Every structure is written in structure tokens, then in C-alpha cells.
Image (cartoon, helix red, strand yellow):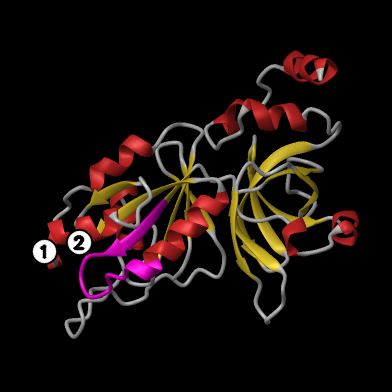
Amino acid sequence: MGDYLKKASGNGMRYPNLKKYGFSERFELEASFYEGLYPARVTEQHRNIYRVICEDGELQAEVSGKLQYAAECTMDFPAVGDWVMIDRIDGNSGSVMIRSILRRKSFFARRAAGGKEDVQIVAANVDTIFICMSLNTDFNLRRLERYMSIAWDSMATPVIVLTKSDLCDDIEDKIREVSSVSAGADIMICSNAEERGIDAVYRYIEEGKTIAFIGASGVGKSTLINRLMGREVLATKEIRESDDRGRHATRHTASCFYCLRAEWSSIRPG
């Protein structure tokens, strides 16, 4: 262990631009043992093609043949949020190669498609998960309990965000119901339409920390993220008058990370 610390401390912070994306001392220590390779964070995945951010910018990447051969399940492949080691930091010669994945400090997962027993990682190395649920007709405590279970299992800290408060006439009753299943998690109330309560999210945002948003389709995740970003980074649609539900507008086929006050927030469709 002493040699491990000595080796890492001798390097100092060699990657200052990656620090704001969560490249902590923990990851730098581990990365220091991969001579000739460079750390990067996975920002997008589209089947076998990845986008990664390294010290010098964003690159397209693929998994090396050796890493593919050693993989025994889908969890052994990179996921959005992973810190990986790549063979170079310029993209002039095609895709860079992902040679290794650094140990994950947290991840949340789901069962892989196709009825297999395999598990697919949705996002890795997340610090705080915002569980979004609307206070209108989409209010569902059982669904919230499932999301809470996913959050706690991931080792990330859950924060419950109750959206569309402008469409709710019994907010206090709803808060009491949510509190009964929240297991002590913080609860926030907001209205995207009235731009109320949104600023409360900022107190959870710190440089180098990673946040994620999960929730059912149409609860207002995209609108909330756009408000936080101060610009439209995700498409949104007006709610349907028939049931007060937002129309599903996010059509990303991969998880994406967006820089939010030097922060990474994981955005999933649905």
C-alpha cells in the first residue's frame, strides 16, 4: 500500500481538466499504475461506439479486443460514467482504444434485454440520484419505492424531486405519503411551469460530483435539466390536456452526460 501511495503522490494532479468531471484522488491513484495509458470518462454509448472525455477533450472510442475477450458479462464492458484507460488522447487516427475500466465506486443497473439473467449497467460512479415523480395523475408510491431501492442498491444518495406542484391541490398530503416510503431521503417540491423550487437542486451540485436524474416518462426531467442548464439541451413537449402527463420527448438511445456547473448529470430517456 505504501508503494501505491508513493507512486501516485509523485505524479501530483496530472489531469486538472478532469477534476471537475469527478476524477478524484481515488481514481488518479488507480490510473497511475497504467503506464502509457490515459484516463477518460465515458459520456455516451451507442452500441459498440463510445464517446469519452479526456484531459484534452472529447474523443470517439471502442473497446479493445483484449478487453472484449476477457469480458464474461455485460457488466465487464464500459458504461456511461465509467472511468477508463485509453491508448492515446488524439483522435487523428480513428477511434481510441479502451484498454481497461477503473473500479466503480457506485453504479445502478437493470436486467439486460432479451430475457437473459445478465445485468446491464445504466450509469456508473454517480454520487446523487434525483428521483423525479410528478404530483399530478402520474403520482405512484409503488414506483417510487422501486426507484428508491435502485438508488440505495447503487450506493448513490437518493433525493426525491416531486414535480408539477402547480397541478396538485393536496401537496401536504402527498408529502406525507412520500415521507412514509422515503427512508429518510431528502424531498424537494418544484414546478417547472412556475419556475419554483428548481434552485434547491443547486445545493447538491459540487465540483467533481456526479448527479443523475431518473423517473417515468413525462414527469418533467428534461424540462428540469434545461432549467438548470439555462438553455435547451433536451427536447420537451407540452403536457396532454387529457391526463396532465408530459409527452415523451427524449429520444436518446444512450445515456448522456452534460456539464452542469462543472458537474455531470446522467440523463436517461423514459
Answer whether labels 1 and 2 touch (C-beta < 8 Å). yes
Mark pair 1, 2: CA separation? 6 Å
Q: Position of residue 143 (x, y in %)?
A: 39, 69
Which label was assigned to residue 170?
A: 1
Q: Nearer the viewer, residue 64 or 142?
A: 142
Residue at the image point whose x is 28% and y is 49% from the top? 187
Residue drawn at point x = 36 percent, y = 46 percent? 185
Residue 141 in view here = yes
Q: Would you say 78 lies left or right of 240 here?
A: right
Is residue 230 something that shows in the picture? no
x, y (%) of residue 3? Answer: 85, 17
**What residue type is disc 1 on?**
Asp
Q: From this view, report whether residue 28 is shown above or below residue 146.
A: above
Image position of 171 (left or right of 16): left
Mark 2: amino acid: Lys
Residue 181: where, in percent of width, then height? Answer: 34, 57
Q: Which residue is mark 2?
A: 174
Residue at the extreme left of the image, as rendered: 169
Would residue 207 be found to the left or right of residue 85 on screen? left
Identify the residue at image location x=50%, y=42%.
Answer: 127
Residue 158 against residue 236 in the figure, above or below: above
**Element assignment for label 2:** helix
Q: Start and end of the magenta stretch? A: 130-143
For the N terminus, the quadrant is top right
Q: Residue at x 64, y 25 (%)?
A: 25
Residue 141 forms part of the magenta stretch: yes
Quarter of the image for the C terminus: give it: bottom left
Q: Position of residue 203 (x, y in %)?
A: 32, 35
